[in-house]
Amino acid sequence: MSTPPIAARKPHSATHHAIVREDPYHWLRAVNWQEVMQEPAALDDEIRGYLDAENSYFEAHFGKPTEALQETIYREIRGRIKEDDSGIASPDGPWAYNSRMLEGKQYPQIVRTPRDGGAETVLLDCNVEAGEGYFGFAGAEHDRSHRYLAWAADRAGSEYYDIVIRDLDTGIDSDEVIIETAGSYVWTNDSSAIYYTEYDDNHRPFRVKLHVIGTSQDDDATIFEERDPGFFVGVGRTLSDKFIVIDAHDHQTSECWLIDAETGGAPRLVAPRLTDREYDIEERDGVLYIRTNAEGAEDFKVVTAPVSTPGAEHWSDLVPHRQGVLILDTIVIKNHLLRLERHEGLPRIVVRDLRSNAEQTVNFDEEAYSLGMSVGYEFDTAVFRLTYSSPTTPSRTYDLDLDTGTRTLLKEQEVPSGHNPADYVTRRLFATAPDGEQVPVTVLYRQGMALDGTAPALLYGYGAYGMSMPAAFSISALSLVDRGFIHATAHIRGGMEKGYRWYVQGRREHKTNTFTDFIAAAEMLITDGFTAKGKIVAQGGSAGGMLMGAIANLRPDLWAGIVAQVPFVDVLNTMLDETLPLTPPEWPEWGNPLSSAEDYARIAAYAPYEQVAAQDYPPIFALAGLTDPRVTYWEPAKWIARLRATRTGDAPLYLRTNMGAGHGGASGRFDRLKETAMCFAFALQAVGRA
């Protein structure tokens, strides 16, 4: 194709708060989108024709011309992966469970060995189960008897998961499949049944059901049903195995219910939902340990309450709130409380001995790093696992014995093609936002690079839902850094890198701080000599893709190119469409333009699709997934169509829709690397280094 596809313009208008808006590309939203999520072949022929034409244009003008470069980058990244790699076994009773990857294979195997040593058994080989199409593996969970394995998979990318039950004595799957679940499930303690979540007609997890093994799914009892479409429902269990936990939540409010894991019965409410109050729970010896932001604990605190009287009126502070010390996660084991915290932008783990209340802190000395913790399956243990990495340091996993103080290095990430951390520099810098806030920016570059403004840069950002971007090791980023790029991550408002306040200042009425923080990060990189105007490629996905659309409108002159992966760019129309899966649950994040004229005006003023203007735009590469229930395919499709029709320049605009995948893109680990290589080839081409 010598010229890009031009989308037809069809009359469509909508009126809200006495404001009429025209949307000539509304027709790209399939009327039967729910059916398309599960059956892509049901897509309207005209819409499919347009998406196919965009894919053909992309392939002709970018895919084929950069094919060799993409393959080179793909081979480089793949060469940094130890393909025949195993995880670290987690003991549970008489067995130790693990996952491993095989050389040349896309998906994991689930395996186990006797705890005291012996032959390994492959319980599930996802490479066999995947077949040729999309395979979204939602994990596997063994029962307490170690006789059965429940595993779940999505075969369309639409996030409908079928749960399969395997007899581990025979290795044979039952014909009894729990179909079209929401992917959250847990065994009962006696292995007789499985609690699972189910979607409503708008693809929202709203109900918990109980499937008794050996009965029809049609007979499954409803255990819990959420009436508010703004709340999603999940099911899990406490590490102590005493309780099944049902949680209902949106982005700022949560509510938990308990079911006795031994006796079953009706769920029992812990504390009723209270707007903007969040809490999650663990249990030990008849006491609930609750991480919460109740009573103004903006950065969270830990309280306790008796299981018998769990309501908020009985909550007692165990770890008081400390402004600026964000408690991200807690784990309770037999004698210890583990807290993952972030203080002054860096993570740390604090361990409290619940017998003496003595505490110890685990942290590291690099300028920027990531840290995680886990304890596997067992509650009665004094050992926990921590994982550490930085942009220069590959991941290291340790076991820390809290009784002896012994720290054991279990595994260090291998880079088969070679990696010397001394060849790279990690920096934690700060950009000054327009309102004076200091925005952290993590930077990675080659040792000895001249910081004279000649280097290109890739600047990554997200900035939503309180999700923080870790300063972690990336085997992919090295392919740009080794080609002379500065690789930078802007820890902008909307995340929680600097506490819960950082999140609040990047949502709803403060959303534009996210965009101006990102622009400030780019300008700091320019001012400090890391790069220059017009040499920065911006990258973000999902809500970070919305960021990409906003900064393209606000400062198109700054960027050499923009990579927008499954970009949430049609914010206003999506937040007006209450039939879409995520819309009601996300009103607390963005605002509700259906009920509030103020929210409507605010979102319209920054929504990337609405604000496309007659100006020159940089090259843009947008990626979409046809079966994506989170950011529907028509958002990037409409955005690119409007950009083509409105802009004044002629920089390339590419839309690539994966016609057999959803929000996460390709499902196989190597296929995902090919998409990364494609994005990096675009970045290199954008700065003239392809």
Image: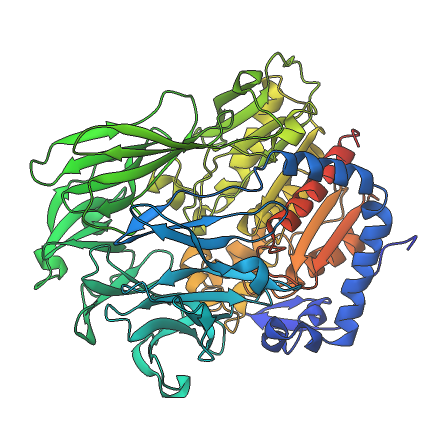
Look at the picture and state if 185 lies above or below 442. below
Look at the picture and state if 343 lies above or below 95. above
Q: Residue furthest right?
A: 2
Residue drawn at (67%, 18%), measured in percent from left and top? 453
Please give left or right for residue 531 compared with residue 306 in the image: right
In terms of image quadrants, where is residue 40?
Answer: bottom right
Is residue 324 in view from this perspective? Answer: no
Please give left or right for residue 302 compared with residue 369 in the image: left
Is residue 352 in view from this perspective? Answer: yes
Q: How many marks are shown on the rendered structure?
A: 0
618 vs 225, nearest the viewer: 225
Residue drawn at (63%, 55%), measured in percent from left and top? 666
Look at the picture and state if 506 lies above or below 203. above
Percent across and percent down for residue 69 are 78, 37
Residue drawn at (73%, 67%), measured in percent from left and top? 24
In terms of image quadrants, where is residue 367?
Answer: top left
Percent across and percent down for residue 410 are 37, 33
343 vs 102, nearest the viewer: 102
Quadrant of the drawing holding the C terminus: top right
Percent across and percent down for residue 644 are 79, 53
Quadrant of the drawing holding the N terminus: bottom right
Residue drawn at (70%, 63%), measured in percent from left and top? 659
